[in-house]
Each structure stands twice: as structure tokens, then as C-alpha cells.
Amino acid sequence: MGNTIKRQLFFIVALALNNGIMGQVISTDTIIGQYRLPSSDPQGGESVLIFSDNTFLTVYFGGMLKGSWQIKSNTVLFKTTSSPQVVVYGREISSLKDTTQIDLSGFSGNQALVGFESGKELIMQSIFNTDANCFASPYIYKTLKELPEFSFAMGKPEIHHESEYNTLNLYSYANTKQYNDFMVVNLPSEYTRDIGFSANYVNGKLFFRQHLVAASKKPLSEGSDEDSRFIRKFMEQELLPDILEYGNEFFPYIENPTEEDLKAFYRIEPTQVEEIQKNEIKHGATSLFHASCD
């Protein structure tokens, strides 16, 4: 009886030691940290920061995306948080008097339509000419007409070929607060669609996106205090806040601003977001702006 118990204990201990050395046990504690993905990109490649609250941040040349992660078997599944294609802000500026203006600088290089007419017929015009190739922001549309409502039509963010732009996303807005100064944010497509990717956990290391080499890992605590504060703020705040104040990266640049120029913008939620066919739109004869170096 004693020998049987000893053999059982020996088996249990051996199994535990073996699992500790060779096991593929994946958990939150084993994966949190900073990961540098293998890359030969001279612009700096990509890093992924995994946090214990099931959120993550991916940092790459020219941008940052955040999202959530979950563990499935020996794989970590990541999904970014998407934002709307178009976000409109408005405010009232007394210096404009009877003029209404809309800053559309963020649409440079994108095929997008804008409509200021109300009625049964949807009349819209391109913001830029189709062969636009030379931009010089800001692009501010001004009118002496009141704008009680307006709309934007955009190609779906997951579509990359012009020939497939038959179905558009239509965003409609109502100017209920009678603002006369508007700013429209048009985010790059990577911010406006859900992006999913994964990493396989093998021998205590993470292999991202089918890379044959494991990502190098550092503790989350490694880095400057300034970087940590910036990351923490980025993770806690909405990319496009309800109140857009001076100092925010999306606040328009104004040279030698007055006190009134620094007034905050307020986010305007769309009254309707729907899919429409391109042939449902009556196109204006010209674009709102013409950008060309030819």
C-alpha cells in the first residue's frame, strides 16, 4: 500500500515538472507585455502592447490602433476598435457674421461626395476632382446660405478598388443648433474598419501574423514616463471626443489665432446612416474644390 502511494506521488511530481518545462500553458500573466514584431521595414516596423484588462495597442509608422484581445486555445485573437468614417463638429463664431464655413481638409486624396441640398432628390458633388494630385490645405468651403442639413457619401472602408464603389455609406446631419463653423474629420480606412489578427503561443513566445520568428518581448513598465502617460491617455479616451478642444490633434491649425478661434467644437451625431447605391445620387457638374498641379 505504501509503495503504491509513493509511486502515485512520484508520477504526480514528475508530471508537474514536465508540464512546467514543456507545457504550452497560455494565460493573461504569460502574455502581457510589449512585443516588437519582426520587420525589415526601414520606417520602424510595428509594436503590440498587450494589457491585462484584455485591451491592446498596436503602434506602427504613422499611426496607433487600439482594441481588445481574447485567448482561444494556444492563440491570442486581436480585434481593433473602429471609428465612423466621417465625424462632424460644429460651433458658432460671431466673426463669420452671415457666412457659414466647413473645413474639409481631411478629405484630401479621398473620393467622397457632399450634399447641401434638401429635398426628395439626393444632389451631391465630389469634394475634389477625380484626378486631384496636388493638395494644399486648408480646404474651407464658405457660403452665405444657411445649412440646416447636409450629408456625406463615402465608399465602404473595406473596399479598395474604384470599380467596386457602387454601394456607398450615406451620413446625414441636421444643424439643429444653428452652428456656422464646421469641421469634418475623415479618418484613414485603418481606423474605420475592424481589423483582426492573431498570434500563436509556442514555447512561451508569441508568433504574430504567421511570422516564422517570434516577437521580442519587454515588460510594459519599460519605457519613459512620458510615453507611459501618453499611452494611458490614448487608451482611456475616445479617438474623437464629444468636445474637441484646442490642443487635440484633430483641432484645425490656425495661424495667429484669436481667442474666438480657440473655442471648442462640439460633435454632431448623424441623424441617419444608411447604404445607398451610387446611381441614386444626382451628381453636381463640378467638384467643390479643384486640386491639380498640371
Image (tube, helix red, strand yellow):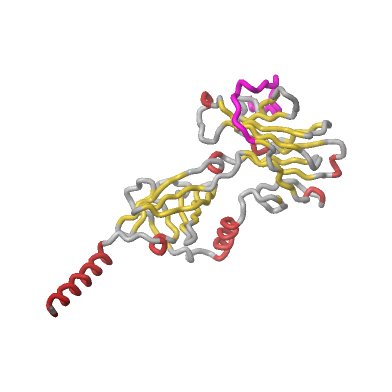
Name the residue nearer the viewer: 123 or 191: 123
Q: Does any portion of residue 137 appear in the rendered image?
A: no
Q: Quadrant of residue 231?
A: bottom right
- Residue occupying image coordinates x 56% and y 41%: 192
Rendered view: 118 above or below 93: above
- Residue occupying image coordinates x 68% and y 27%: 290
Q: Residue furthest bottom?
A: 2
Name the residue nearer the viewer: 120 or 85: 120
Name the residue nearer the viewer: 212 or 22: 22
Rendered view: 259 above or below 292: below
Q: Quadrant of the C terminus?
A: top right
Name the residue nearer the viewer: 277 or 38: 277
Instruction: Say left or right for 107 vs 190.
Output: right
Q: Quadrant of the N terminus?
A: bottom left
User: Is residue 275 inside the magenta stretch?
Assistant: yes
User: Is residue 197 inside the magenta stretch?
Assistant: no
Start-end of magenta stretch:
273-294
- Residue occupying image coordinates x 66% and y 50%: 241
**Residue 242 at x, y percent in the picture:** 69, 50
**Residue 38 at x, y percent in the picture:** 39, 50
Q: Does any portion of residue 34 appear in the rendered image?
A: yes
Q: Quadrant of residue 113?
A: top right
Q: Quadrant of residue 86?
A: top right
**Residue 177 at x, y percent in the picture:** 80, 42
Instruction: Say left or right for 180 vs 32.
Output: right
- Residue occupying image coordinates x 74% and y 29%: 116
**Residue 124 at x, y percent in the picture:** 69, 25
